[in-house]
Amino acid sequence: MKKTALITGASSGFGAACARTLAEKGWQLVLTARRAERLAALQRELSAQTPVHTLALDVRDAEAVAASFASLPPEFAEVDLLVNNAGLALGLEPAHEASLEDWDTMVDTNVKGVMYCTRAILPGMVARNRGHVVNIGSVAGSWPYPGGNVYGATKAFVQQFSRNLRADLLGTAVRVTNIEPGMAETEFSKVRFKGDDEMAGRVYTGTEALQPADIADIVAWVASVPARVNVNSVEVMSVHQAWGPLAVDRS
Ligand SMILES: NC(=O)C1=CN([C@@H]2O[C@H](COP(=O)(O)OP(=O)(O)OC[C@H]3O[C@@H](n4cnc5c(N)ncnc54)[C@H](OP(=O)(O)O)[C@@H]3O)[C@@H](O)[C@H]2O)C=CC1
Ligand SMILES: N[C@@H](C=O)C(=O)O
């Protein structure tokens, strides 16, 4: 029987790449994000390969998360792998100029969204004594950079939440991994710069960023090691990056 992976933020970037890689490796998929049409397209692409269930969902909505995860079709209900990937950065302004609304959105998505999805899925994993929570943190959670203020802090939350989850899960076979990518070429910068493609393009100019499939390969790897092994964290950067995300000239 196929194992089930539930991926948040599957409509783009790392999440869509994880869907493709895990489908190849024989997983069946629950794909969630807000953009239902993107999920439907991915479902059409992958359904010849593996069963796919899609769920249009905003991870900031605690009630919707709990209700939709509790009412998955029976064949998808036992989630073996939760990939907490949905997330975003908004803006790159210094703290004294940043928008409080952007800060709230990042906290609601990157912190509370991860909390809500994890809380909804973990009881089933613990009851079955089987499962794996893979969180997508960021090098921004460990390394400072100008304008990284609240985004980096949300990813520091993901790092410590992952460690503390392991402490709570000691004595069970449920695993937790925090993957911390550096600069990767996805829609992340378009979202951060609110559709300013020129600014977004500057992030990737003159360098070679990680690609979504690189992160998907790591997710598939941490999920495939022997059950006794917990890969606690993976920090991964482009060979062209050695510390926090590259500064972008805002002028
Ligand atoms: N690209 C990079 O350089 C790095 C990215 N990361 C992290 O990787 C993760 C994936 O980002 P990446 O693939 O790069 O960026 P993308 O913008 O390509 O993908 C982000 C995904 O998150 C989903 N998402 C955003 N907000 C919500 C929400 N409120 N509810 C549900 N889904 C949501 C989006 O779907 P939709 O809009 O359809 O809801 C989309 O599928 C994020 O957590 C990001 O912080 C970490 C390190 C580096
Ligand atoms: N590369 C991003 C990581 O999350 C960032 O710019 O912070």
Image (cartoon, rainbow, N blue to C red):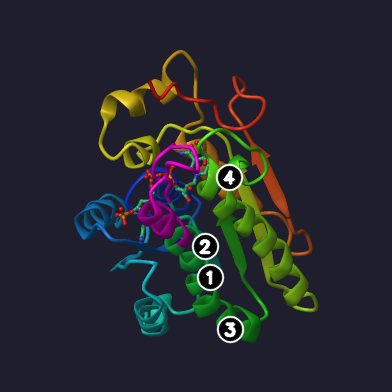
Q: CA distance from mark 3 to mark 4?
A: 26 Å
Pointer 2: residues within 10 angstroms few (<14), some, or many (20+)? many
Q: Secondary structure beneath disc 3?
A: helix
Marks 3/2 in contact by CB < 8 Å: the verdict is no
Question: Reading the chain from its start, which is encountered first: label 4 or label 2?
Answer: 2
Q: Mark 3 sits on what residue? A: 123
Image quadrant for the C terminus? top left
Question: Reading the chain from its start, which is encountered first: label 3 or label 2?
Answer: 2
Q: Mark 2 sits on what residue? A: 111
Q: Mark 4 sits on what residue? A: 138
Q: Residue at x 73, y 62 (%)?
A: 163
Where are the magenta residues, as a range? Answer: 88-107
Marks 3/1 in contact by CB < 8 Å: the verdict is no
Q: Secondary structure beneath disc 4?
A: loop
Q: Amino acid at mark 4?
A: Ser
Q: Give x and y (percent) for residue 35.
A: 24, 57
As drawn, the label of residue 115 is: 1
Question: Reading the chain from its start, which is encountered first: label 3 or label 4?
Answer: 3
Asked if 138 appears above or below 79 in the picture, the reply is above
Using residue 188 as the reference point, say whether residue 26 is left or right of it. right
Using residue 131 as the reference point, say whether residue 59 is left or right of it. left
Q: Secondary structure beneath disc 2?
A: helix
